Amino acid sequence: MRFKVAPSDFLQPQLLPCAHLTGPDRYLWKSQIHWDGDLLVAQRVPPESGFFHLLADVPGWGRTLLSTAWLMEQEKTYHLQVELARGQLHLLRGQYREWTALGLQPGEETQGHLQQAFAFLREAVVASQDAAKAGRLAVQSLVASLHAGEHLVQHYVRQGLPVRLHQPDLSPPWLGMNLGRTVPEGKFAESLKDVFHAVQVALCWRDVQTGEDQYHWDCPDHQLRWAREHGVRCIGGPLLGFHDLAAPDWLLLYHGDLTNLRQLLSEFVEQTVTRYRGQVDLWHCAAGINGNTHMELSEEEHLVLAARAVELAHRLDPETPAIVSFDQPWAEYMAQQEVEPPLYLADMMVRAGVPLSGVGLELNWGYHPGGSLPRDLLALNQLIDRWSLLGLPLYVFLTIPSHTSPDPLASDQAQVMLRNAEGHWGAEDQAQLVRQIAGLLATKPVVQGVCWNQLQDNQPHRFPHGGLVDAQGHPKPAWLRFKQLRRKFDSELEKD
């Protein structure tokens, strides 16, 4: 596919490594993309029609991943901005028709922006002989579509959340917080209890079993005791993590030895589940199944170990649901690796009869590499709908940055992406996205819980500036957004 870029300053060469092609399932193809200063060329070997995605700074909106509609590979040159505007409008109109058919009242702002987006795109197509003019009009169409999508989602959440909360056959979604190594106490503990329905308890293999015969239970013991005393639900785990910071260092002695790794994992899971049986409301058995590991295990070996953890937890504590989670659910890493998409891996576990009670999505928003590229909310809605085809409840583990500066306590290689070309992430940006993303997720009936991944910035953590409490110990504005969402839940439920 060849794209003419006019005006050419719309394309930022430093963002090209994030560009990619996808197929009908929206998962990435390994492809070749280059820009010679005149044409942008995207090619898959072997050639194939598909969607083209580009990370771009949209004026007045910010940095977001855009997509064309379905395009054929051909000799004729496409106009990049026009095709991106066409793709965004196509996504918007499809979701608009689906939700209004279900009874959604979209509001005048949504309809106004939608009409503007269509009018600007029509003018851009008519002005195709003047490439620069067509590009400027297409960008205006893009902006209008993005604003229309934002308003459409706002109306969906405003009208859909009360409906979801009042459905007698559905349990209300819960909001959770990963405690890390923090044991709640004092006023902070009271605030935590008032905002979050659940806490994720530190049962990381690396932290609990520091040697083959050395277990340290003090931290999870205290966390679980606090949760039980205050009536807060508990998520235990993840027991097994596939990123470098989750596995004990001593496991390197068994590098590539699946038989011994499986035996060692079984011993750890048996010890942990037996100790805390009846105290945990949800076992998070494995995280990042589709991630890379320093033990050089294959995808199939990841699945074997994750399935073993689930089967053991289910056998030892059959009354407690057990889940696994997948990192980077849009699978940006597939642009460099020929591997199976995460949704396919989850489907393989379901078809194999692994006793899963649900599936988790690890959504680390705005980080690269190792995280999820920023998208609009309609793309997130589309992702959740796709994963709902598994027929299992979904749990989303969420991180969003609040700053772009270096973070000395962050241990992951992922970096915070710029919010846009002119500015950086701030605490208010994090808070705004918490309101939008958590609100949308809570409205989806398939989503049973939303858990924030990092509590504090003043303790070692994976992702930079991803806590809800800053390095000075003060709650960020995003904390208030979770509190407001919790109040919304409670006020709606009181109406029953």
Image: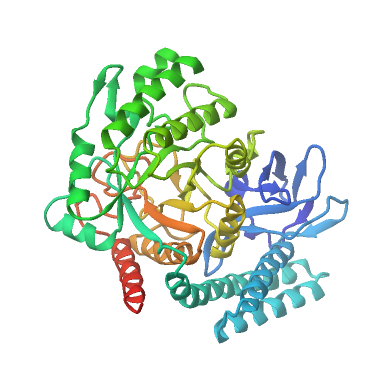
Residue furthest out toward the right: 75
Label count reads 0
Here the colouring is rainbow
- Residue pictured at 72% horizontal, 40% vertical: 32
Q: Relative to 233, is 355 above or below?
A: above
- Residue pictured at 53% horizontal, 27% vertical: 304
Q: Is residue 63 visible?
A: yes
Q: Is residue 299 left or right of residue 187?
A: right
Q: Nearer the viewer, residue 125 or 203?
A: 203
Residue furthest out toward the bottom: 108
Q: Relative to 262, is 7 above or below?
A: below
State which quarter of the image contains the C terminus.
bottom left
Q: Is residue 365 visible?
A: no
Query: What percent of the width, then of the height, locates residue 142?
Result: 64, 69
- Residue pictured at 44% horizontal, 41% vertical: 414
Query: What percent of the width, then of the height, locates residue 204?
Result: 33, 34
Query: What percent of the width, then of the height, locates residue 277?
Result: 30, 38
- Residue pictured at 36% horizontal, 29% vertical: 269
Q: Is residue 336 left or right of residue 123?
A: left
Query: What percent of the width, then of the height, locates residue 43?
Result: 77, 43
Q: Nearer the viewer, residue 15 or 165?
A: 165
Q: Quadrant of residue 33?
A: top right
